Image (cartoon, rainbow, N blue to C red):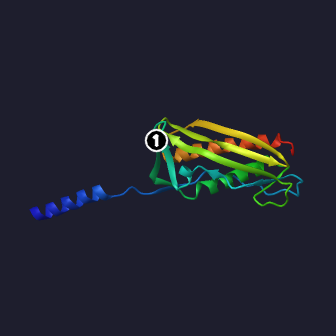
């Protein structure tokens, strides 16, 4: 009997100490894609969004303090972050720029081109999400630059809320880029 109790206790303790946390996968909130309208003389080609190397993994990133970043082990992107950002940006700009044809395929050297680099896209210990980077619009020989930097509060605890806040912030960045494009010489 004593031996049996010892075996159960050993198994219970071994189970508690070695049970790994379950992986959680996240994706940015989906954006409704607008059906392309007729042929527009204005074409915007969106290059794939580039992310800083520390963001180029499946892990969500958590900033502990001014200099320390941690890649989460159990909270992962379900799809590469750069692909999600590119797809969401394409959908946002397609909806916002109704008199433009927004695409990822170059048709002519006269097409306007948009490149976006993201340098921050993570959460902090202070309950914020940080999004920063730079957008460049090339129209003919004219290059227009737009830096962006957002700090948004997270509405509630948990990584679900972090991802929702990151998605909201990315929508705001896309809106700022749309304004830059409409104010460009080709608009």
Q: Position of residue 80 (x, y in %)?
A: 58, 57
Foreground of the two, 173 or 65: 65
Foreground of the two, 43 or 27: 43
Please indicate, yes or no, whether residue 40 appears anywhere in the rendered image: yes
Foreground of the two, 141 or 98: 141
In this image, 41 relative to 149: left or right? right
In this image, 51 relative to 22: left or right? right
Extreme-front residue of the structure: 141
Extreme-left residue of the structure: 2
Secondary element at tag 1: loop
In this image, 112 relative to 62: left or right? right
Which residue is at a point 56% across and 51% down the rendered structure image?
53
| Residue 108 in which image quadrant | bottom right
Which residue is at a point 39% across and 55% down the rendered structure image?
21
Please indicate, yes or no, whether residue 1 appears anywhere in the rendered image: no
Instruction: Name the image quarter holding the C terminus.
Output: top right
The number of numbered badges drawn on the structure is 1
Label 1 Cα crowd, 10 Å radius (few <14 / some 14-19 / many 20+): few
Instruction: Name the image quarter holding the N terminus.
Output: bottom left
Q: Position of residue 50 (x, y in %)?
A: 64, 52
Q: Which residue is identified by label 1? A: 68
Which residue is at a point 83% across and 42% down the rendered structure image?
184
Q: Position of residue 59 (x, y in %)?
A: 50, 53
Q: Position of residue 3 (x, y in %)?
A: 11, 64
Q: Is residue 68 above or below residue 27?
A: above
In this image, 12 relative to 90: left or right? left
Q: Is residue 130 above or below residue 6?
A: above
Which residue is at a point 19% across and 61% down the rendered structure image?
8
């Amino acid at each position: 009997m004593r031996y049996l109790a010892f075996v159960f206790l050993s198994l219970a303790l071994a189970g508690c100490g070695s049970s790994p946390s379950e992986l959680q996968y996240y994706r940015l909130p989906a954006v409704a894609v607008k059906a392309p309208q007729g042929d527009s003389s204005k074409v915007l080609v969106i290059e794939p969004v580039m992310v800083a190397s520390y963001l180029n993994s499946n892990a969500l990133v958590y900033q502990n303090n001014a200099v320390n970043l941690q890649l989460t082990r159990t909270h992962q992107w379900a799809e590469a972050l750069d692909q999600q950002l590119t797809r969401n940006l394409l959908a946002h700009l397609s909806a916002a720029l109704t008199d433009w044809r927004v695409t990822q395929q170059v048709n002519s050297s006269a097409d306007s081109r948009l490149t976006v680099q993201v340098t921050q896209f993570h959460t902090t210990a202070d309950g914020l999400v940080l999004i920063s980077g730079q957008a460049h619009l090339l129209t003919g020989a004219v290059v227009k630059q737009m830096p962006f930097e957002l700090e948004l509060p997270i509405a509630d605890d948990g990584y679900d809320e972090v991802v929702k806040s990151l998605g909201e912030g990315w929508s705001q960045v896309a809106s700022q880029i749309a304004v830059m494009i409409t104010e460009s010489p080709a608009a």
